[in-house]
Image (spheres, grey):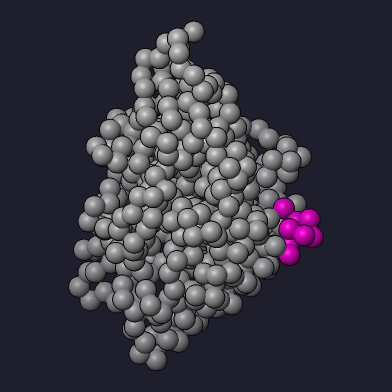
Amino acid sequence: MGFDLVLKNAKIPQGNRTVDTHILVKDGKIAGFTNDLTGIEVAEVIDAENNLVLPGCIDSHTHFNDPGFTHRENFATGTQAAAAGGVTTIIDMPCCSVPSVRSVDNLEAKLEVIKDKAYVDYAMWGGATGEDVRNNALYNIKEQADYGVVAFKVYMTPSVPTYPPASDAEMLEIFREVAKTGLPVGIHAENLDLCTYHVNKLRKEGRFDGPAWAEARLELAEKVAIQMAISFAEETGARLHIVHMSTGIGGVLVGEAKKRGIDVTAETCPHYLVLNAYESMTKWRQFAKIAPPLRTTKDNEMLWEQLADGRVDFIATDHAPYEIATEKEAEGMDIWTAFPGIPGVETMVPIIVSEGYNKGRLSLSRLVDVLSRNAAIHYGLYPKKGALEIGSDADFTVIDLDYEWTIDKDKMYTMAKYTPLHGMKLKGKPVKTIVRGKLVYDDKNGIVGKPGYGQFVKRQTISKLERWLKF
């Protein structure tokens, strides 16, 4: 039998060691592994050059703004940035498009617009808002789940006008409805009343420095929001997922809830691991403004520990870029009025490899878990995604662990040429990104894939027991 591709000279992870092999690919899927290519017919050969090969990395939290806000990012530029960052699958949020994805009709409209743009594969979050509760439209939750979305997103604080937040009571109703589907409900965990009060307080006091934003969106606002969400999950049986968790205390709460048998998971983002509010927001001001905000070095340390021991389940980015001229640095704009969000899909894998694995904070097996395997299991994409198994999609992130380089905002593929990570020196970099057996990014040649190659990936059914055994 002939093969379409061999990825030769690959070092693949097996537990905390690597194994040298050649990976055979047929029809976009992994077809086998061999140490001897003698007599094997192969149409294309890609040399991994004895670099580490991970199952294609997944960013499960992106805002690519298409359609509707494409002055910030679109699906072509966003998925190019993903490919350059070693990400083979993204999962896009429902809020930052027009219309927002809160029904199957809205989802199909979005998929129609983006289908010819993507360079990597993509799955979709579904949506539910307080407005849907008030309009008796929660029937849309089951319909979206049946269509193949992987989870549902709920905001406690305002996002965009097309995606209103939910009150506490409305959120509880959403939990009840999502629980029937067996899918996760992802919560932006910040208490709206606490945030609003302290933002107004600091503005009245004349605080317009960068760190004021972080002080106003205080740690307690995330803490009490997570506590309430855990209580709602316990009451309803819903699968709770805390998105972009920024605080160490959040990880403590999630860990305690796990021990009590509550079905709760959490993600954090690279910026919450390597940046702190005082330094970064003093230096970069609105270009380091995000929600939840950057925290302290103590939070950095705690989140690394929690990522290593499983209290934090995996990494995502909350990639949410804005247009500099109109939304970050417009005339008269200050730290309170600038839009909160930064790009991240392009730098996620390098930071976790450099600052996590290469510095001994994460083992090799945990590196695979947090960058690929756990998100695939959590969102029902495993083992199609997130695995180096025969029959899995031939998605590979090839990483040169010794590659030393510096993040440069002007060289990023994202439309938003800013990042508070600009100038950060790293060791370790994705040098090839392969999606279903096709090379889409090569460090020497840049983006080599074609728009429209990326495919929509629907969730696969997985039981709670299967998820528990794998996760």
Screen quadrant of the C terminus: top right
Q: Quadrant of residue 279?
A: bottom left
**Residue 261: in magenta span:** yes
- Locate residue 395 relative to residue 279 in the image: left or right: right
Q: Residue at x 20, y 73 (%)?
A: 331
Name the residue furthest right: 260
In the rendered view, would you say 24 is above or below 49? above
Q: Residue at x 79, y 60 (%)?
A: 260
Location of residue 30 in the rendering, given as x and y in whole percent from the top left corner: 52, 24
Q: Nearer the viewer, residue 339 or 261?
A: 261
Q: Quadrant of residue 146?
A: top right
Q: Quadrant of residue 390?
A: top right
Q: Residue at x 45, y 66 (%)?
A: 274
Residue range highlighted in magenta: 256-263
Q: Nearer the viewer, residue 383 or 245?
A: 383
In the rendered view, would you say 20 is above or below 165? above
Name the residue furthest bottom: 205
- Locate residue 446 relative to residue 273 in the image: left or right: left
Location of residue 255 in the rendering, given as x and y in whole percent from the top left corner: 70, 62
Location of residue 264 in the rendering, given as x and y in whole percent from the top left corner: 68, 55
- Locate residue 378 relative to residue 262 in the image: left or right: left
Location of residue 334 in the rendering, given as x and y in whole percent from the top left corner: 29, 77
**Would residue 71 be seen by someone viewing this image from the given angle?**
no
- Locate residue 453 relative to residue 235 in the image: left or right: left
Number of numbered callouts drawn = 0
**Residue 161: in magenta span:** no
**Would residue 309 be seen by someone viewing this image from the given angle?**
yes
